[in-house]
Image (cartoon, rainbow, N blue to C red):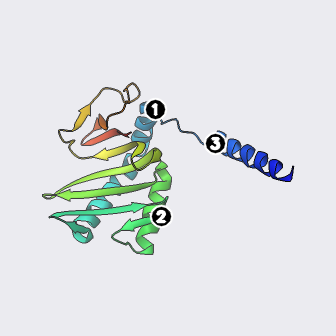
Amino acid sequence: MRKRGLHLAGVVALALLAAGCDNTPPTDQEMIDLFQAQTPVFEEIRRRICGKAEHEGKDSGGNRSQVIMMDPEWSDPLVSDEDRSRYYALFEKIGAEGVQAVVRSGVCEVSIEYWAVGWAGDADYKNFRFGTPDQTVEIVDSLDDVRLGSEIVFYRRRLEAGWWLSLDHWP
């Protein structure tokens, strides 16, 4: 009887935990409103991460990269505690989880990690991006209406001056 009670308590605890998790992505309009209200924060993150990637980033086949994430907490290459604190303060202003930058041929592309559900090969991500989308990306008028199936897909919706909303689907 005791074992059954513990099992039931565990099931109830998991159900309550799952009920508290919201896997619904933010709408395009919510993200657009945030971007418009906090554009200077987005631009500061972009400037900082591009400068760091270009001058101190990890070299990989001629490209340089930098990643700084809050959850889980990591960076590659490592950053100082002072830099990490500055980034985290900026992330908190916009509700971001982290930022990634890649510099290719002197051009910096940025992804500000905003929303994710799933893990690794079975996940969806809705982010703010800066840079020119490559040929694998589909440009759409709304990310809210796209169909996600069994294929890996990358969607972008234009914001302004090099900025995009992105939805990446990894089934």
- Taking the spot 36% from the left edge, 33% from the top edge, the residue there is 150
First along the sequence among labels 3 and 1 = 3
- Of 92 and 118, nearer the camera is 118
First along the sequence among labels 3 and 2 = 3
Tell me where residue 114 appears, x and y as whole percent: 44, 47
Q: Secondary structure at mark 2?
A: loop
Between circles 2 and 1, the one closer to the viewer is 2
Answer above or below: position of 83 versus 90.
Answer: below
- Taking the spot 31% from the left edge, 38% from the top edge, the residue there is 152
Asked whether disc 2 touches disc 1, contact meaning CB atoms under 8 Å apart, the reply is no
Instruction: Indicate which disc residue 27 carries.
Output: 1
Left or right: 84 with respect to 104?
Answer: right
Task: Read off the residue under disc 3.
Answer: 18
- Taking the spot 45% from the left edge, 74% from the top edge, the residue there is 81
> Which class describes the residues within 10 Å of circle 2: few (<14), some (14-19), or many (20+)?
few
Left or right: 30 with respect to 142?
Answer: right
Kind of residue indicated by mark 1: Thr
- Taking the spot 42% from the left edge, 56% from the top edge, the residue there is 98
Tell me where residue 94 appears, x and y as whole percent: 47, 49
Left or right: 12 with respect to 134?
Answer: right
Task: Read off the residue under disc 2.
Answer: 73
Residue 99 falls in image quadrant: bottom left
- Of 134 and 88, nearer the camera is 134
Kind of residue indicated by mark 3: Ala
